[in-house]
Image (spheres, rainbow, N blue to C red):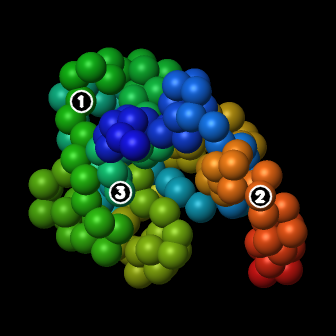
Amino acid sequence: LDIGAATPLSLANAYLRGIPIRIIASGSLYSTASPQSLLVIAPAKTAPAPAELNGKVFCGVSVGGMDQLAVDAWTDKMGGDASTIKFVEVPPSAVPEALQQGRVDLCVLAEPALTPAIADKRVKAISKVYGIAYGNRFTMALFFGANDWLNNNPVLAKKFIGALVDG
């Protein structure tokens, strides 16, 4: 079943298209009090003013995913025009170098790469981009299953949820 590899929020799209699935557990909770993703720039740069966001090159882990959606919303909320920016995919390990070489202007960087990159002064955090785009607390990842499988395997599904909680 192909619902579009680059379709943002594929689980929601699957549900809206009538694919018989159910969410069974939360996988990750975002909180601005302890963000696991931040918008970063090269350490020698200053944070751009809203008018300077237009035409910038942003990066994150995937084109069309949560990072790009957050960047688009953040850009518009900060006074820029998201339709003018470019978003490219850069693996987290390559973000500091891409920023320092000027191949990208701003990047969403997540843990576990975020903390060491900030501590080593390879990047500078400028915004809790997810919090501005999506709100202060939200579920970033969900575990789900096909309705038929869940109906036929309730004990195994409960064991899986229990293992998540125990972990």
Above or below residue 79? Residue 32 is below
Above or below residue 40? Residue 7 is above
Residue located at (79% from left, 52% from top): 151
Residue 59 as seen in the image, left or right of residue 73: left
Work out how far the residue at label 2 is from the one at label 3, CA to CA, in angstroms: 36 Å
Work out how far the residue at label 2 is from the one at label 1, CA to CA, in angstroms: 47 Å
Residue type indicated by callout 3: Val
The quadrant of the rendering that contains the N terminus is: top left
Horizontal and vertical percent position of residue 18: 58, 27
Query: Mark 1 packing: few (<14 Cα in 10 Å), some, or many (20+)?
Result: some
Above or below residue 68? Residue 140 is below
Horizontal and vertical percent position of residue 143: 67, 56
Circle nearer the N terminus (2, 3)? 3
| Of marks 2 and 1, the one in the foreground | 2
Residue 34 as seen in the image, left or right of residue 87: right
Horizontal and vertical percent position of residue 116: 47, 80
Residue type indicated by callout 2: Asn
SS for dot 3: loop
Work out how far the residue at label 1 is from the one at label 3, CA to CA, in angstroms: 16 Å
Would you name the residue on which mark 1 appears? 85
Would you name the residue on which mark 3 appears? 61
SS for dot 1: loop
| Of marks 2 and 3, the one in the foreground | 2
Would you name the residue on which mark 2 appears? 152
Residue 137 shows in this picture: yes
Circle nearer the N terminus (2, 1)? 1
Residue type indicated by callout 1: Ile
**How many numbered marks are there?**
3
Residue 103 lies in quadrant? bottom left
Q: From the viewer's side, name the closer residue of 70 and 38.
A: 70
